[in-house]
Amino acid sequence: AQSVSQHNHHVILSEAASLELGCNYSYGGTVNLFWYVQYPGQHLQLLLKYFSGDPLVKGIKGFEAEFIKSKFSFNLRKPSVQWSDTAEYFCAVRIYNQGGKLIFGQGTELSVKP
Amino acid sequence: DGGITQSPKYLFRKEGQNVTLSCEQNLNHDAMYWYRQDPGQGLRLIYYSQIVNDFQKGDIAEGYSVSREKKESFPLTVTSAQKNPTAFYLCASRPGLAGINNEQFFGPGTRLTVL
């Protein structure tokens, strides 16, 4: 069965530290990849997405992610986190031609200390 | 103001009662989805619909039912057969077949507590 795995359940960083959240998926065919963020009390919203082309994609608020096909990975990065980045982050995969449904990872809760 | 609305935000029900969660969108999206969010498990797909009057089971459909009589509405019923219904329920929509490279947009969610 297809699955998505996020390596860290809870990450605690100080402001200005660099961030990397791991995401791996298990499917050998064509996929679209997404990172969503859920700030406390807010809607789940899209951070960035990868469909094709340049494997390094940039999203909102200074986030970026790199798709490495050989490693089935789509890790999220930010060079310098801010207190306002405190949120839960979800990696998701969409399998081509399966109704557009998303398969989500377990989520990573990020806490940034001021 | 376009978007997805879910009501109510908080819902309490007694064990054994069916309850229906509302999801409405005015984005003219073809596809709609229901997910369940539990701590440490991410979001899991319950049901989805790509077009009016058609829907498919997701990964955890047991104990749930849906209907799609109108393009803008996709209500979810949590039945008494659902063993552990207390959760946060998220509705999403997507433009659908017309746009392959598009993403899902999410509503604010309904937190259901079964007492």
Image (cartoon, coloured by chain):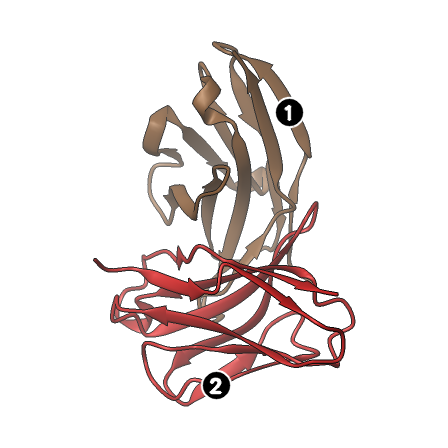
Q: Chain ID for label 2?
A: B
Which image quadrant for residue B15?
Answer: bottom right
Q: Colour of chain A?
A: brown
Q: Position of residue B23 (x, y in %)?
A: 42, 70
Q: Colour of chain B?
A: red
Q: Amino acid at mark 1?
A: Val
Q: Which mark is residue B5?
A: none
Left or right: where B95 falls relative to B61? left
Q: Amino acid at mark 2?
A: Ser
For the residue pair A20 and A41, the one nearer the viewer reads as A41
Q: Chain ID for label 1?
A: A
Mark 1 on the same chain as mark 2: no
User: In the rendered image, which residue does mark 2 sit on?
Assistant: B67
Which image quadrant for residue B113?
Answer: bottom right
Q: Is residue A8 visible?
A: no
Q: Is residue B96 visible?
A: yes
For the residue pair B110 and A35, the one nearer the viewer reads as B110
Q: Residue at x 43, y 48 (%)?
A: A43
